[in-house]
Image (tube, rainbow, N blue to C red):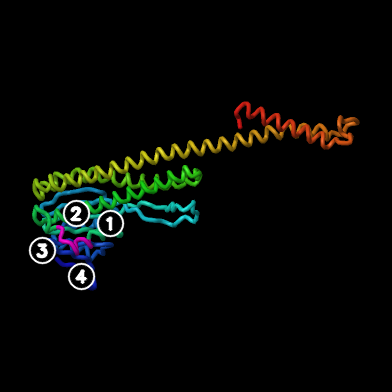
Amino acid sequence: MCYNIYRNISIMLHKFTYKNLTWIDLESPTENEVISIIKDFSIQSFIGESILSDYARPRIERYPDYIYMVLRIPIRFKVAHSKRHISTRDYRRFSVEDRELVFIIGRNFIVTAHKQSIPPLENFAKVFETDSIIAKDPLGEHAGLILYYLIKKIYAHMENDLDSMRDSLMNAEAGIFDGYERRMVEVLSNISRELIDLKQSSRIHKETIELFGPIAQGFFGQDYKFRYADDIIKQYAKIHELTGNNRELLTDLRETNDSLLSTKQNEIMQTLTIIASIIFPLELVTGIFSMNTAYTPIVGHAHDFLIIMGILAGITLAMMLYFKYKRWV
């Protein structure tokens, strides 16, 4: 096994080899790089055009000497950190972005092309370079095995992202019951956006992955379908299930947060209503005694101020007792 990076004036590509198997990975490929790959592996020119285009529709197609497949990989990454800290918890903000990944799979070669970095591919490159995973496989050596382990690595990365989202939801749950309902509205909204983006991306995989089984069977044999293609379908189903579980948890937390927030707002409104109800009669009494009339009871008495204040205190006490009797406080 060896790992090479070829460089000259017109081309740079990452090439991994193990015995008679070759994996070539192109990141942000140039036109010259794509032309070189097309010539080396006798690939149809329209596939090269799709690699260089800004958008290629997810699909899978079988050709006599290779399989052409396009997937959109959701990558979760951290964005600007919020300056607001709540207790000791870290409510980091993430975003999910689709990154196009093109596969060209022959019997003894596989080409991957993408315009942006895809972490699971980078991780797999390290494993491929240091660990002969192909040699440990009982079905022998062909490029379908590299594809299988690549897709498994991608889905494992997606599963880790979903587990991380669940951890974020559990942190949000703690924040809800710690009394930070208002802040959790923003936190839950951010997580909801991540889940929506990831769900849309993984949903696009469904048709392609389901077609992958019969196409791979015709290309690599029946054993490949039952041992590898079906396992990839199971991995996709697991991602779909985890996404659904996170969506259910998010919905439950939102309902709980909205309920607590509504209750807190109702308590505030109730308190303000009680204060206003107490102040109104007090203002009425003080307004009466401040009237500019020829004769006003109590006013002018030696202890008129204390008497009026006593009346106001008595009214306040009576209203508080009434509110308590009605269980409004």
Which sits earlier in the primary sequence, circle 2 or circle 1? 1
* Residue 188 in view (yes/no): no
The circle drawn on residue 149 is 2
Residue drawn where x is 27% and y is 45% of the image: 239
Categorize mark 1 by other alpha carbons within 10 Å: few (<14), some (14-19), many (20+).
Answer: few
Which is more foreground, mark 3 or mark 4? 3
Image location of residue 145, percent across then percent down = 14, 54
Instruction: Identify the residue under disc 1.
Output: 53
Magenta residue span: 125-133
Which sits earlier in the primary sequence, circle 2 or circle 4? 4
Residue drawn where x is 30% and y is 51% of the image: 160
Image location of residue 64, percent across then percent down = 10, 52
Q: Amino acid at mark 2?
A: Tyr
Which sits earlier in the primary sequence, circle 1 or circle 4? 4
Residue 132 highlighted magenta (yes or no): yes
Q: Quick one: 261 or 216, which is closer to the camera?
A: 261
Which sits earlier in the primary sequence, circle 3 or circle 1? 3
Image location of residue 136, percent across then percent down = 12, 57
The circle drawn on residue 228 is none
Which sits earlier in the primary sequence, circle 3 or circle 4? 4
Q: Amino acid at mark 3?
A: Lys
Q: Secondary structure at mark 2?
A: helix
Instruction: Identify the residue under disc 4.
Output: 6
Residue 106 lies, with reference to residue 129, above or below; the image says: above
Q: Amino acid at mark 4?
A: Tyr
Which is more foreground, mark 1 or mark 4? 4
Name which quarter of the figure residue 289 lies in.
Answer: top right
Instruction: Identify the residue under disc 3.
Output: 19
Q: How far apart are the alpha carbons under marks 3 and 1?
A: 33 Å
Which is more foreground, mark 2 or mark 1? 2
Q: Quick one: 325 or 263, which is closer to the camera?
A: 325
